[in-house]
Amino acid sequence: MRLANNQFSFGWVSIVIHWLSAITIVGLFAVGWWMVDLDYYSEWYQTAPHWHVSVGILLCLVTVFRLIWRWCQPSPKGIGAKWEQIAAFAAHTILYLLLFVLFTAGYLLTTADGRGIEVFNWFTLPSMGELFEKQEQLSGDIHEFAAYGLIALALIHALAAFKHHFINKDETLNRMLKPSKQLNGDNK
Ligand code: HEM
Ligand code: HEM
């Protein structure tokens, strides 16, 4: 079982984190969208934001690990035309950037009132208080826009992956599903 990436394909660590993150992000988006309209008397009024924020912070830690893991080893070589490789690189970079905008805005929005974040009651992330005027409102708007932007770009990203798979019939999607056995000499 190959955990690490090589220059031809992703290893299991990158693959598992990619798909777990994708599912978590779609879940966070759906819960976020639903929870902002909850009635004060709903039983989810407190619980849903608590889960949303806790899962968001854990995803942030996983994403930091994901980037460190990525930079510690080769990335698989790009597939397709030069412009496609540039577009894919730009899209992946923007996806990562939007994630960090969401984490930061989410943190600033949640902690603006001076209270820390209780991550599943395991540990508390301290608040830095109100760092600028209208912090809650501004971070809330940025959080909302970044969330829509992320989901829109992820959709285009998924369509591009399907285009590679079904039209170009290349290895792009396969190598994000299972470490490729070809060309790399370690077929385990
Ligand atoms: C990938 C990560 C995340 C996604 C996709 C996401 C998505 C969303 C969405 C779609 C909303 C509803 C926006 C609206 O209509 O106003 C929302 C609200 C919210 N999110 Fe996130 N979120 C993420 C991470 C986080 C994190 C890390 C935190 C906190 C540390 C957080 C805290 C909040 C809070 C407090 C709200 C409620 C905002 C309000 O009351 O207007 N989110 N999120
Ligand atoms: C919220 C959803 C998603 C996010 C945020 C996301 C994000 C990313 C990122 C950041 C990378 C670059 C990995 C790296 O090299 O560091 C990547 C790669 C990839 N993603 Fe996604 N992804 C999502 C959903 C999907 C879906 C639904 C599909 C397919 C149907 C998909 C297919 C792929 C493939 C095939 C690659 C590898 C591309 C290559 O070989 O260069 N992703 N994704």
Image (tube, grey):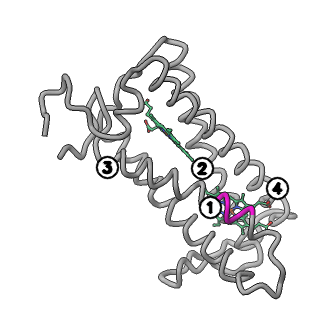
- Residue at label 3? 13
Kindly identify which numbered label has been placed on residue 99: 2
Residue type beneath disc 2: Leu
Residue at position x 67%, y 71% in the image: 128
Q: Earlier in the sequence, mark 1 or mark 2?
A: 1
Vertically, is 181 above or below 1? above
Q: From mark 1 to mark 4, how far is it between C-alphas?
A: 16 Å
Vertically, is 87 above or below 98? above
- At numbered mark 1, what does the secondary structure look like: helix, strand or loop? helix
Q: Earlier in the sequence, mark 2 or mark 4?
A: 2
Name the quadrant containing residue 159: top right
Residue type beneath disc 3: Val
Residue 87 position in % (x across, y down):
57, 22
Vertically, is 13 above or below 113? above
- Residue at label 4? 141
Q: Earlier in the sequence, mark 3 or mark 2?
A: 3
Magenta segment main secondary structure:
helix
Q: Mark 3: few, some, or many residues within 10 Å (few <14, many ≥20)? A: some
State the extent of the magenta-drawn residues as a range: 28-33
- At numbered mark 2, what does the secondary structure look like: helix, strand or loop? helix
- At numbered mark 4, what does the secondary structure look like: helix, strand or loop? helix
Residue type beneath disc 1: Leu
Kindly identify which numbered label has been placed on residue 112: none
Q: Quadrant of the C terminus?
A: top left
